């Protein structure tokens, strides 16, 4: 709990209604979406303007108080769990204005607390498109998306958050404003500090504004669902689609366990006996969409799809994608604890990775449902367990350890989109090098000499 003097200081700065110090409030900001131990912060402050945000950061720095920035707290790696009990959480959801949408120059300027789906909807009203679409978009914020370099279902064709960041303004640890990038397509003025902030997980500064690239909306789209009686064939079909030089905007995978669980809940009529399904969408000019859909269907059949369904209308298409969107929530209902993993491999290694995930699950006798962005090699093996059962959770952790080893051996990565935080920090050196850890720590110490910004996250400070 913060001192009364500090609470009064913040109340004077940002208003009583934006300073939270009750036990119940503090508990609410002690955890995020990762399966990790919670830490109750000393105070939560919610600035509502850029000036206030800078003043809050400066006050915390001047007083040597640790800080954790928080958007919606949907990250899956512990990035917003306070480092220690005297940490102050700086909430950005009061900075939620879309400052500009420029349809001529195809960019928008936003504050960090804008909710991703609200932004995409505002842009769509002007017939423009902001493609990054994390599954959490109904609540996640643009600041959180940038700080995690969030991906989503459209990564294969459209890329991820980093591909849409043209410029960032942020406060450094001391509260000084830093600006990088611009509203222009090209900008090489100074270091690419905006690039440095992407994926920085609240450790290098506090993002206060972003210029985001927009693209024209696709004019048409077509969805397909392919059914496989063998998971390997589905995985090989993914590689086949890419090898045929077609880039679907979405290319998703669901394994049998996920299909059955989702169908039980949604009654969407999914093929329950299938070993795996692929959900695919192609978009663009209508003529291109027709060509691409035909090419995809051919590859799917050549690779052993037992059936390829094309939704007959918008309602059926919605149901298909709803089934995919329900994968995580439905799996999460099955057992008390859901550990959603993010191991990612080069696309051609998906068959090997899928084989390994299932073998590992069998070896450690743990339940896993796998779905994910197959087109990006980004699988989400989801471990269903009960953390209170220490013996079972130990097996889950051992299985995850082994899974990361396989991902790294296959030239993949620990995390395609969920970040490192504290959840995966201990594996970082394995994927990178000792030099990478030391270099990153030197960078942090130079930019944050008091070690106040999310100190325990990523490589630590
Ligand atoms: C159901 C579900 C589905 C998900 N689906 C996806 C998915 O498809 N793809 C994907 O990539 N992720 C997904 N995620 C993970 C998560 O939603 C993303 O990481 C998202 O970008 C986090 O946004 P947030 O606003 O909740 O950020 P938070 O969780 O609040 O913060 C995330 C990190 O960013 C830092 N941060 C936040 N705001 C700022 C700021 N203004 N300046 C500096 N640092 C800041 C925080 O300190 C923290 O380290 C999912 C999560 C859930 C729960």
Image: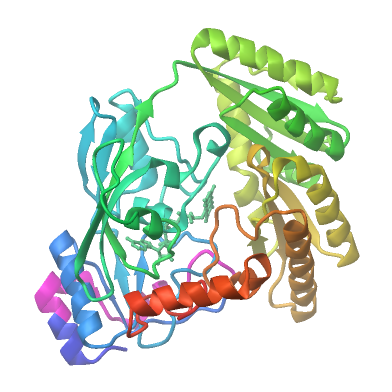
Q: Residue at x 40, y 72 (%)?
A: 28
> Where is residue 14 drawn, in percent x and y?
14, 70
Q: Quadrant of residue 155?
A: top right
**In this view, 232 is above or below 66:** above
Query: Foreground: 448 or 6?
Result: 448
Is 436 on the left or on the right of 139, as rendered?
right
In the rendered image, residue 193, in percent from the top left (x then y), is placed at: 33, 58
Give the residue displayed 67% in from the left and 17% down from the top.
310
Residue at coordinates 64% horizontally, 33% vertically from top-left? 251
Residue 54 location (% of width, % of height): 18, 68
In the foreground, 438 or 159: 438
Image quarter where the C terminus lies is bottom left
Residue 26 on the magenta span:
yes
Q: Residue furthest left?
A: 12
The N terminus appears in which quarter of the rendering?
A: bottom left
Tell me if residue 128 comes above or below residue 29 in the rendering: above
Any magenta on residue 140? no
Q: Which residues are magenta?
A: 10-35
Colouring used for the render: rainbow
Figure quadrant, ligand 1: bottom left
């Amino acid at each position: 709990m913060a001192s009364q003097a500090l609470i009064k200081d913040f109340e004077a700065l940002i208003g009583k209604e934006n300073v939270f110090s009750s036990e119940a409030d503090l508990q609410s900001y002690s955890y995020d979406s990762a399966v990790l131990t919670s830490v109750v912060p000393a105070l939560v402050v919610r600035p509502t303007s850029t000036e206030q945000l800078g003043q809050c950061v400066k006050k915390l720095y001047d007083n040597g108080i640790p800080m954790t920035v928080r958007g919606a707290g949907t990250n899956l790696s512990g990035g917003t769990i306070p480092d220690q009990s005297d940490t102050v959480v700086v909430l950005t959801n009061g900075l939620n204005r879309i400052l500009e949408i420029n349809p001529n120059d195809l960019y928008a300027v936003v504050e960090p607390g804008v909710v991703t789906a609200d932004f995409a909807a505002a842009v769509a009203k002007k017939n423009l498109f902001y493609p990054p679409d994390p599954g959490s978009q109904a609540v996640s914020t643009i600041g959180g998306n940038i700080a995690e370099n969030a991906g989503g279902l459209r990564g294969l064709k459209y890329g991820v958050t980093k591909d849409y960041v043209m410029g960032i303004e942020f406060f450094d640890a001391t509260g000084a404003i830093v600006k990088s990038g611009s509203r222009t397509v090209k900008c090489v003025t100074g270091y690419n500090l905006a690039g440095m902030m992407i994926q920085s997980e609240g450790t290098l500064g506090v993002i206060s504004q972003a210029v985001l690239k927009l693209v024209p909306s696709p004019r048409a789209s077509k969805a397909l669902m392919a059914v496989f009686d063998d998971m390997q064939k589905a995985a090989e079909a993914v590689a086949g689609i890419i090898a045929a030089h077609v880039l679907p905007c979405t290319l998703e995978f669901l394994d049998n366990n996920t299909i059955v669980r989702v169908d039980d809940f949604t009654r969407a009529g999914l093929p329950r006996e299938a070993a795996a399904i692929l959900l695919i969408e192609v978009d663009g000019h209508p003529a291109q969409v027709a060509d691409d859909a035909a090419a995809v269907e051919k590859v799917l059949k050549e690779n052993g799809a037992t059936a390829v369904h094309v939704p007959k209308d918008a309602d059926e298409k919605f149901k298909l994608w709803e089934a995919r969107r329900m994968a995580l929530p439905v799996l999460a209902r099955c057992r008390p604890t859901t550990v959603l993993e993010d191991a990612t491999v080069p696309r051609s290694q998906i068959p090997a990775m899928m084989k390994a995930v299932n073998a590992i699950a069998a070896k450690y006798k743990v339940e896993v449902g796998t779905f994910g962005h197959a087109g990006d090699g980004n699988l989400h093996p989801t471990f269903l367990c009960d953390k209170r059962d220490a013996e079972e959770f130990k097996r889950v952790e051992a299985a995850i350890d082994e899974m990361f080893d396989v991902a790294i051996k296959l030239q993949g990565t620990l995390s395609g989109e969920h970040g490192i935080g504290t959840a995966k920090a201990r594996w970082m050196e394995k994927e990178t090098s000792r030099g990478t850890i030391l270099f990153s720590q030197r960078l942090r110490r130079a930019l944050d000499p008091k070690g106040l910004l999310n100190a325990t996250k990523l490589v630590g400070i």
